[in-house]
Image: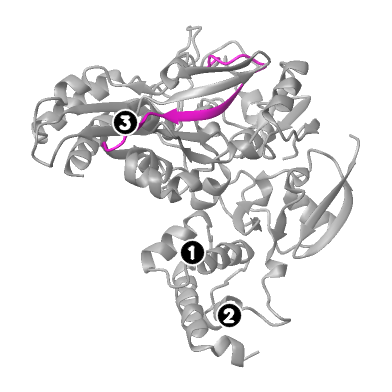
Amino acid sequence: MALSEFQLFRPKTIQSAVALLAQHKGDIQVLAGGTDLLPSMRQKLFAPKYVLDIRGVEELKRIRVLAGGGLEIGALVTLSQIEDSEFIRRNYPVLRKAAMTIASPILRNMGTIGGNICLDTRCLWYNQSYAWRTSCGFCIKKDGSLCHVAPGGSKCWAVFSGDTPPALLCLGAEIEIAGPGGTRRIALADLYTGLGDTRLKIAKDEMLTRVFIRESMSGYRGAYQKLRVRGSIDYPLAGVAVIVKSSGRHAPVQDAKVAITAVNPSPMLVVGADHALIGRAVDEHIATVVGELAARTAKPLTTSALTPEYRREMIKVFAKRAVLEAAAG
Amino acid sequence: MKKELIELRVNGRIHELAAEPNKLLLDVLRHDLGLTGSKRGCDDSSCGACTVLIDGIPMLSCTLLAASCQGQEITTVEGVAEHGGLAAIQQAYGRWGGAQCGYCTPGFMMTVKYLLANNPDPSEEEIRNALSGNLCRCTGYEQMYQAIRDAIEAERKGLAASSR
């Protein structure tokens, strides 16, 4: 399927990229790795007048260890670069484990961390060809007024399907957003709205530029588990990230975080999971309790080919397995 | 839509051509440059038949704008042959029947080229993982794994050089 017509910009700096965003606000789409946007443009989910190809902004392609400690990851760093980073493997293993499960090795060479954070939400009724969507009378997220997932409702339940954001939420990551007035820095947790259609709190003339992880979050052991239909291609249909800090396998947990993805319109930290884990040595029972907390946070609906019941159950199973894996180091 | 002049470096040669901004790299390679080795398979970035190397790294040419690839080195299956002869991996695919219908083969070639360039002695698991983004509908994976092992062996013994 052909892409709709557009004019292409290829800025070399953040400043010129942001100026173009401001100038063509609403009619312009940011293109980085292209693995999310271009297939969607083929399906006519987007038909922007302008496309802003930021692949030429060199300063956003770096992973940088900061002088005062901590890590800065440019938005254009590819998922393969994350996977290959020895520093990330050693200090923030949960991020590497999540990144290396994304799509296929070839797609990880293209897809970026910024794109994974800003990923469009997905739904069985949305990620379809124009002809397919026409035959169903469209949906609330695109071109229509009806939600096929929750008929009668006015909320879009399309699911956030990024794998790195739950890992980054566990690590308390912050992001830098560039706009016409300069840059602002917010917690990643504050980026997401919880709505399937207007998923990000980011203005039309802004773009994500960097991710920051504090040094104090290094040294946590981590695990990431996910469910998908085809093991080397598909988006997750349920995903769980876990980080645990302790002095050894059977030592009491000093700190822990659990986050889930692909079962809500945004990635979510599992409230209470840290309290369930802190101060105790991890065993089957505690891992099961965390699994139940995670399943309670998950609100899967009929947005995919797998049933919501199965996905919720798998969140429970994967959370338990991920807790045991992280604790075992 | 207005065409724009773009400059692409493909298999070591520079091509100047006029293309619409929405034109995919795969279409420019096949239609404008006559390099029909790269194939359109799924058209939704899941099969790998269109895989090419961009600055040495495998990417999907069906999911790249041609104009975005200016200034980068593009390698297609037509650029895999070495010194006018088949590369070791191409010879090994021939010996082991690594290509059945052949449609997915150019994409696999590019992935294997990258794998062996970066990891000359991959384990079985590393081979399978590296190839997991390319699909073969003939399901002839086993012959491909054998061909890759054979090519590694041939390189090691220097057979590739002597058979040219």
| Residue at the farthest front position | A67
Mark 2 sits on what residue?
B88
Which dot marks residue A217? 3
Check disc 2 and give the amino acid type. Ala
Q: In this rendering, would B6 be left or right of A255?
A: right
Quarter that holds the N terminus of chain A: top right
Q: Is residue A257 above or below residue A248?
A: above
Is residue A275 among what the camera can see?
Answer: yes
Chain where mark 2 sits:
B
Which dot marks residue B139? 1
Q: Is residue A153 above or below residue B55?
A: above
Please provide percent x and percent y for residue B156: 48, 84
Q: Which marked residue is nearer to the observer: mark 2 or mark 3?
A: 3
Residue at point 78%, 24% (across, down): A49
Chain where mark 3 sits:
A
Magenta-drawn segment: A198-220
Which dot marks residue A148? none
Q: Which one is nearer the viewer's eye here, A284 or B159? A: B159
Residue at point 91%, 36% (across, down): B2
Q: Which marked residue is nearer to the observer: mark 1 or mark 3?
A: 3
